[in-house]
Image: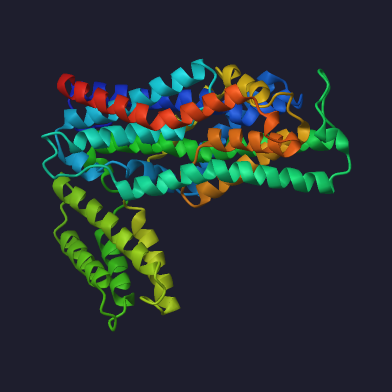
Amino acid sequence: MLFGIDLGLSTALIALLIITILIVCIFEFVNGFHDTANAVATVIYSGSLKPTTAVVWSGIWNFLGVITSSYFFGMAVAVKIANLLPVEALMGQDLHHSIAMVISVLVAAIIWNVGTWYFGIPCSSSHTLIGSLLGVGIAFSLMPENVENVGVNWKEASKIGQSLLISPAFGFSMAVVLMFILRQVIKDKKIFKEPEPGTTPPNWIRGILIFTCTLVSFFHGSNDGQKGIGLLLIALMTFMPLKFALSPDFQPATANASLTKIYDALPTDVALPELSKAKETIEKLQADIAKHDPKSVKERLSLRKRFTILKKNMEALLAVPYVISNEENRKVISHEVKDLGKYTSYVPTWAIVVISLSLGIGTMIGWKRIVVTIGEKIGKRHMTYAEGATAELIAASTIGLASQFGLPVSTTHVLSSGVAGAMVASKGVKNLQGGTIKNIALAWLLTLPVTVILSGLLYFILRKII
């Protein structure tokens, strides 16, 4: 029992569950103060807001970004993070090995995040988390307990990897373009000059800087907050697969009706292996639903796995217009698949609140080290108002779009590349501090291999202890 709720776990497992949830909260807390600089550096160094006001304001909007993300963007990012690991296999294996895996991911990510923060190096919490997930996934695939011969979801990992690689390049190039446009459009040249110490920007540019700081904070919460929620989902599904393998709102009759609509909307005059496979998956799902026992972990896991497979099959078929050419049928399939998706993307409200608080409070603490790097050490001179506004606007737009499309991106890399792009647009590459850029690039290159190795080793050790 926990807070009067019967979890179906022993006292020892409840203690381990509480410890795991606390470690998830610590990761999100560290993510908060590690990434705060991305939002507040420009408003602090432009004199738009005092440091204390800036970090409290950013913390509030990070909190709101997480708490409202399910309404604005859904939980696509959280589900993508959770699906990096073979969660169905995890929930079916020795519970203590699964716990070791979850804790290894979190501890490895926290160690690297705290280390780069200590040295004031802007580093991606997203890269850190994904490297840690890949590390334990690879380690698990090599272990004797992996009887199903499963491992990392490399297809999902490659999609996330592409978004993480493209977003910094996009941020840099768009910042260069925007700075060029601003120079052509804005007549007040004061915003392109270094601000004098103790002065505040013109009211209109100050308003833009505060607004973009708010947007970056909000979208950071909506994107990075979901990564913490994804980790929490993995933990909850590991400890309590019966409760979290499928949404508590799962209704067999409703799900069966959706499956029938999808089946009926599929073409009957097209001979395609993928189409036959999709129909077979639907038939097996309907058979599983017919004999569904809500008290059977095995059956709940089987349903979850088939729902996930069906979603992938349908997305692949819809991506090729000529397979399902009837527009009305395409809409029906898309709508019903989305409706079925809620059964495997359930997130309890309390989990969203816990992660929101952890990220929001973390945002208000420990921000100074990386703020100094972004504000003073990327460029050889003080950041101008225009450079700050450009970097923030590009970062907010990129992260917002990524959240809309369910893509995890690095706020740190997008903002840092935006600052670099804005400064290069002003006075060329010579305007950058080579040492800082090298440190950031080195951290960017080392993050994945270090976290992969660290989390893999931790899993190998903890699976023998826990």
Q: In the figure, 193 relative to 295: above or below?
A: above
**Residue at 17%, 35% in the rendered image:** 142
Question: What percent of the width, then of the height, locates residue 338?
Answer: 39, 60
Q: Nearer the viewer, residue 337 or 32?
A: 32
Image quadrant assignment for residue 182: top right
Please say whether residue 251 is visible from this viewpoint. Answer: no
Judged from this view, the residue extending furthest toward the front is 430
User: Is 112 on the left-hand or right-hand side of 374?
Assistant: left
Question: What percent of the width, then of the height, locates residue 8?
Answer: 19, 33
Please say whether residue 180 is visible from this viewpoint. Answer: yes
User: Is 195 on the left-hand or right-hand side of 276?
Assistant: right
Q: Nearer the viewer, residue 311 or 459?
A: 459
Image quadrant assignment for residue 340: bottom left
**Residue at 23%, 52% in the rendered image:** 305
Question: What percent of the width, then of the height, locates residue 160?
Answer: 41, 45
**Residue at 45%, 18% in the rendered image:** 115
**Residue at 13%, 45% in the rendered image:** 148
